[in-house]
Image (spheres, rainbow, N blue to C red):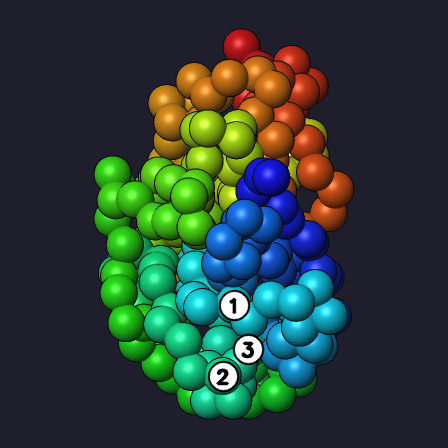
Amino acid sequence: MALQFQIMPVTPFRQNCTLLWDDNSGEAIFTDVGGDSGFLWQEAQALGLSPQAVWLTHGHLDHAGGVVALTQEHPMPVLGPHPDDEFLLQALPQTTAEFGFPVSPAFTPERWLAEGEQLRVGAYVFDVLHIPGHTPGHVVFHCAAEKLLIAGDVLFYETIGRTDFPRGNHQDLIDNIRNKLLVLPDDTRVIPGHGRMTTIGHERVYNPFLQG
Ligand SMILES: [Zn+2]
Ligand SMILES: [Zn+2]
């Protein structure tokens, strides 16, 4: 009995949508539904799960572009990101068209998130940490009991998020990673928004952006 997860890369950007569930209660959620919502729902159903919410780390199209398609088909609340990413959710019709994604309407989540809030999947509590830098309203989800971090586009295996987008800020990103993520236990597992998993301990030692 434990917190379970399955990473399902979606969209041409191979964004790591993650299905999180409590295998005791069967409660489940999706993080970052960038696209391919029909595929995501089928994968959940194949595991016997009917996710009850979407949690968003930030408003980029590869993380939020499939939310409306999913929730129109399977109504469920959308939680996050921080309201400073509202401009990105409002821009989805343009950005999805520009990148050749299925066009997404703009939307407003049922609940914006802020530093210090807590979300639950069954018995498991996740702390919301606000990590601006990649986008101004980026949040990450940390389950201290299970040492699991849903990191979105903040921290990747041996690299960090790009900051050359509108309202990106490299120093904010570095400072927030140092102050809020590198203080977590070394064996904290990190699910990044793209690519392979890592740990806080590995990034502390090997991430070239976080040395010195
Ligand atoms: Zn992003
Ligand atoms: Zn991304």
**Hey, which quadrant is residue 7 in on the image?**
bottom right
Q: Does residue 155 appear in this view?
A: no
Residue denoted by label 2: 74
User: How packed is label 2: few (under 14 Cα within 10 Å), some, or many (20 or more)?
Assistant: some
Residue 169 coordinates in the image, percent (x, y)? 40, 43
State yes or no: discs 1 and 2 in contact (Cβ < 8 Å). yes
Q: Which mark is residue 110?
A: none
Residue 1 coordinates in the image, percent (x, y)? 60, 39
Q: Earlier in the sequence, mark 3 or mark 2?
A: 3
Looking at the rendered structure, the secondary structure element under dot 2 is loop
Between circles 3 and 2, the one closer to the viewer is 2
> Which residue occupies 60% across, 66% down?
49
Q: What amino acid type is highlighted by mark number 2? A: His
Residue in the foreground of this view, choosing between 59 and 91: 59
For residue 169, above or below residue 159: below
Q: Earlier in the sequence, mark 1 or mark 2?
A: 1
Q: What amino acid type is highlighted by mark number 3? A: Gly
Looking at the rendered structure, the secondary structure element under dot 1 is loop
Residue 194 is left or right of residue 135, and the answer is: right
Residue in the foreground of this view, choosing between 36 and 101: 36
Query: What is the spatial separation of the Cα atoms under label 3 and label 2, in whole angstroms?
Result: 12 Å
Residue in the foreground of this view, choosing between 184 and 125: 125
Q: What amino acid type is highlighted by mark number 1? A: Pro
Residue denoted by label 1: 51
